[in-house]
Each structure stands twice: as C-alpha cells, then as structure tokens.
Image (cartoon, rainbow, N blue to C red):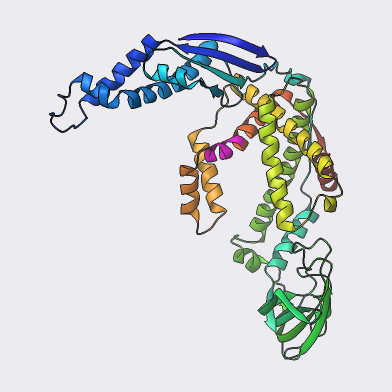
Amino acid sequence: MQITEVNADGLKRTLKVVVGQDELGQRFDRRLDEIKDRVQIKGFRRGKVPVAHLRKLYGRSLMAEVVDQAVKETSTQALTDRKERPAMQPSIDLPEDKDEIERIIDGQSDLAYSMSFEVLPEIDVTDMSMIKLERLTVDVEQDAIDEAIGELAKRSTAFEAEEGRAATEGDKVKLDFVGKIDGVAFDGGTGEGMEVVIGQGNFIPGFEEGLAGVKAGEDRVVTATFPEAYQVADLAGKEASFDVTVKEVAAPKVPEINDDFARNLGAEDMTKLTELVSARIAQEYAQAARMKMKRELLDALETSHAFDLPPSLVDSEFESIWQQLNQSLERSGKTFADEGKTEDEAREEYRKLAERRVRLGLVIGEIGDKNKIQVSQDELRRALVEEARRYPGQEKFVYEYYEKTPGALAQLRAPIFEDKVVDHVLEQVKPAERKVTKDELFAALEKVTES
C-alpha cells in the first residue's frame, strides 16, 4: 500500500491510496481459500472443487468483495499510519472510469482511490490556574426550611366536599364542561369529571375566576380567552365560552405540621423531617452554585481557546440544532416572526451556538484525553437506569432502544464525561468562595444563563 498526501489546506486533507494488484491478488487468494471448503457444487464433493472452477464461478463477485474490504482496511490503516485524527468519517472517491474498475476487478490493475477529510485541530490547552472563578455558598436559613415544609403541607392538602358550599379561592371544583367559540364546540374543549383548584392558574385566563361562587348542581357559562402564545394556533388569542355543570365543591384541609405529619412523609418525627428538608435545600443551593460556576467555566474555556473549527463538525451540529428548532416551531404553530427575528437572523444566532458547542466539545475532549478521564461502565449503567426511570412502565423499551440504536449510548456518555472534566478543571482552578443570600445566588445563576 502506498499513501501520498495530495492536499493539505488548513484542516482539510486529501490522501491518495494505492493498493497494488499483487496485494489484491493475495487478498483474493486468501478469500478464495476461506470459501473453498464451504462451497457445495453439484458434481463435486465439499472441499474438492478445483480452484480454477471456483475462480470461474465466483471470481468477479469475490474480487468485488476483496476490493470493498481492501478500501475499508487500507483507509483505516492510512489514518493510523499517519496518526491522523479525522473530525468525521472520510469521504472515499473510487475510480469513475468503468474500464479502470473492470481492470481492477479482473486483477489487471492497481486499486487507486482518494480519501478526503478534515482533521481535528491541534489544541494548546490553557493554564487552568489562570482561570478565576467564584463558588457562591448560601447558609440554609430557618425561614427557608419553614417555607419548604409549608409547601410540603400544601401538597399534602386533602379536599372535603361540602354540600351547599360556594366555591372560593383554594377550593377544588369537580365539573363537566363543553367549550365553544362563536357558538361552535372545538376539538379538545370537552371534559367530564375535571377537577379545578381555583387560584392555581392551571387553566386559561378567566376560567378559574369564572368559577368563583359556584355550588354543586349549578350550571354556569364561563368566558375565558386563550393566550396569544397558546400552543394550538387555531385557538391562540380567541375568546371561548364554556358550558359548565358543577358536580362537587370541596374545601381544602391543610394538615397540621407535627410529628404525625412528618411520619406520613416517611420521617421519624419533625426533627428528622427538618434535617431532611435542610439537607435537600443545601443540595439545591449547591447544585445552583455549581451550574452558575460551570457556565462561567465553559465561557472561560471558550474565550481562552482560539483555533480553526472543522466545518463538517460545525455544519453537522448546526443542522441538528436547526432541525430541532424547526420541529419545535412546527409543533407550536409559530414562525420566526413570532420569535421576533428573521430566519437569517436565527440562522446566524444558531450558527454561533453550533460553533460554541463544537469548540467546547473539542476543548473538553482534549482535556479529558490528556488527563485520561474516562466514563466507566458502572457510571454508564447508572445513567441508563436513571434514564429508564423517567419512563415508568416503559423501562424495557428504553433499554432496548439504547442497546440497539447506534450512538445512543454516546448521548448518555457525553454529559457524564463533560461533568467529570469540569470537576477535574475545578480542582485545578480552586475557585474562591463567597457567601451570599439565596436571592443573590439564583439571580447570579439567572444572569449567566441568559447571557
């Protein structure tokens, strides 16, 4: 095999690979030897078919297989020998001349093909100790604990139906309804046994307010208006009337916060529940602080590394983002104009996002490789279990999807690898700690998220 570099322009490479006809002949003979003991031909015992006869029957088809396999193996070997790091799968260009192809298959000519690809750029990883970060810390105050326990109590609220009760805020109303626009019922606008808690804001504006004062057995017409940004385009911004029949009005009964309440939630008593809630709040603060610090670290890694990006990687990432965006717009019935931008402006914005993701992906990959950071099978297995838990009752299908879909496990591996690299870098950066309030923490997180 001969390898010649015919083009090296920036990150682009083109190699010419020549596999001599002698090597092809040797590969063909080995392939013929592999099948001679397995071929069953009428008039011959298995394994006793003359080689000349096998060549006559299967020669061209076997040589076509040999050529295909030779291209796969030699193209891989060429990259290995040259220590190339292709950004994506190389493009292989075989001879276009039919006579040339015939000569190759007949074993009368060398196999010559070209392979084009982009290489990953050389990345000079910045000195991590030069990056300045701040880890925000928040004390868990008693007010936050009390508020969280109060929310637990609210979520544990039971409702008791009261005959003759006029519905007020916080009450649960059970009802049937038929929604109409201009007197005509619309799809999805009918419900039976629907339960509405007045004041929760789970329905379109005006609906819950229109139930104030209703009693069991009452019929009422409630008027409400769909939001302009409603996900069903045909209903967005339109006023609708709902013929409502009230079945039941139930008053909320918030449980008393005591040891019995704690035991109902699985804790031994209020002291233990308080400890558990405090630990959960501390974890939420720590996660928020890490998210804020991680975003700042990624920003620092992006701005401190300047190198050419492989266009093929950027194009692939952009197409993935663009496809997801258009699918989202289609589902919601919206256009780019609804988002306050033109399609060209959106393309420019998401192209920059694709470039950021590719640059950070390469930097993170380089840091991980140089520091031998890997994702273990146990870590991948735990991630798969967590993913399956997101789909109760469908765990088997989730496992089968990740087992049978090429590249699916890589999607689980990537965020684990990224977090491990981030943790490694943070150990080197040694962020300074600063104590802040809860509001300051989440304001800081919101600020870096929006930037």
Identified at 42% across, 24% down, the residue is 68
Residue closest to the eye, 372 or 337: 337
Q: Residue at x 60, y 10 (%)?
A: 6
* Residue 178 horizontal/vertical position (percent): 72, 81
146 versus 81 height, above or below: below
Task: Give the left or right position of residue 170, taking residue 376 as reference.
Answer: right
Q: Position of residue 25 (x, y in %)?
A: 34, 13
Q: Position of residue 40 (x, y in %)?
A: 19, 32
366 and 178: which one is in front?
A: 178
User: For residue 364, what is the image quadrant?
Assistant: top right
Q: Quadrant of the N terminus?
A: top left
Q: Quarter holding the C terminus?
A: top right
Segment colored magenta: 407-414
The outermost residue toward the front is: 99
Q: Nearer the viewer, residue 252 or 93?
A: 93
Q: Is residue 380 left or right of residue 137?
A: left
Asked if residue 291 can be seen in this view, the reply is: yes
Residue at point 82% right, 85% down?
213
Per the picture, the main secondary structure of the magenta-coloured stretch is helix
